[in-house]
């Protein structure tokens, strides 16, 4: 694994923005660093929406929000001194299995990323117990890489 090959998993939240900013601060001026911004999407169930048009409209809004976030994250990394060519973006659609955490770990292993950066969402202890936490699962299950969890 190459520790200068960084994977930043984002979800377009304020915590993800803080993770990008933290990584930008740490990586600014470091030679040979490559960053991949990864967004893993799980489409909402169609049964949550009145009709197909409402579901498609929601998906379009989410798509636009994510790509705005990725554009902003790229600019933040460039402003910190990373070359534009050293920054890649990747989005994946995730079904119920594997989990989002496992999908992130699969990308980390496949890409040879030696460092994984993620924001902590800030679940309550009860929510974390019931639903689990992506960052907790990443720390627990990551192999052969450093994991930075940014609060």
Image: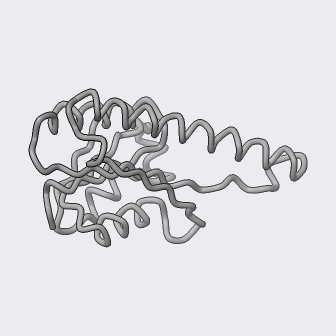
Left/right placement of residue 101 relative to residue 148 reads right
Q: What colour scheme was applied to this rendering of the protein?
A: one colour
Tally the marks.
0
Give the quarter of the image for residue 146: bottom left
Provide residue 119's location: percent of width, then percent of height: 34, 40
Residue at far right of view: 51
x%, y% of residue 92? Answer: 52, 60
**Residue at position x 29%, y 33% from top?**
78
Residue 103 in the figure: left or right of residue 1 = right
Q: Foreground residue, 108 or 128? A: 108
Most foreground residue, 86 or 37: 86
- Residue 107 lies, in percent from the top left, at 36, 66
- The front one of 149 and 111 is 111
Q: Is residue 7 left or right of residue 41?
A: left
123 in relation to 107, above or below:
above
Identified at 11% across, 35% down, the residue is 29
> Which image quadrant for residue 1?
bottom left
Residue drawn at (79%, 56%), measured in percent from left and top?
46
Image quarter of the C terminus: top left
Q: Residue at x 16, y 39 (%)?
A: 27
Position in image of residue 105 (x %, y %): 34, 65
Determine the image quadrant of residue 143.
bottom left
């Amino acid at each position: 694994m190459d520790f200068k090959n960084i994977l930043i998993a984002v979800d377009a939240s304020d915590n993800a923005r803080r993770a990008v900013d933290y990584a930008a601060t740490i990586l600014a001026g470091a030679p040979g660093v490559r960053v991949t911004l990864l967004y893993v999407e799980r489409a909402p169930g169609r049964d949550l929406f009145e009709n197909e048009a409402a579901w498609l409209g929601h998906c379009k809004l989410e798509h636009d929000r994510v790509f705005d976030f990725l554009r902003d994250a790229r600019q933040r990394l460039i402003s910190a001194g990373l070359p534009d060519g050293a920054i890649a973006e990747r989005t994946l659609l995730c079904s119920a299995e594997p989990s989002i955490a496992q999908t992130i770990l699969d990308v980390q292993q496949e890409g040879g990323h030696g460092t994984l950066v993620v924001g902590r969402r800030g679940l309550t202890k009860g929510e974390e117990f019931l639903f689990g936490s992506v960052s907790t699962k990443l720390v627990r299950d990551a192999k052969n890489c450093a994991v930075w969890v940014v609060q």
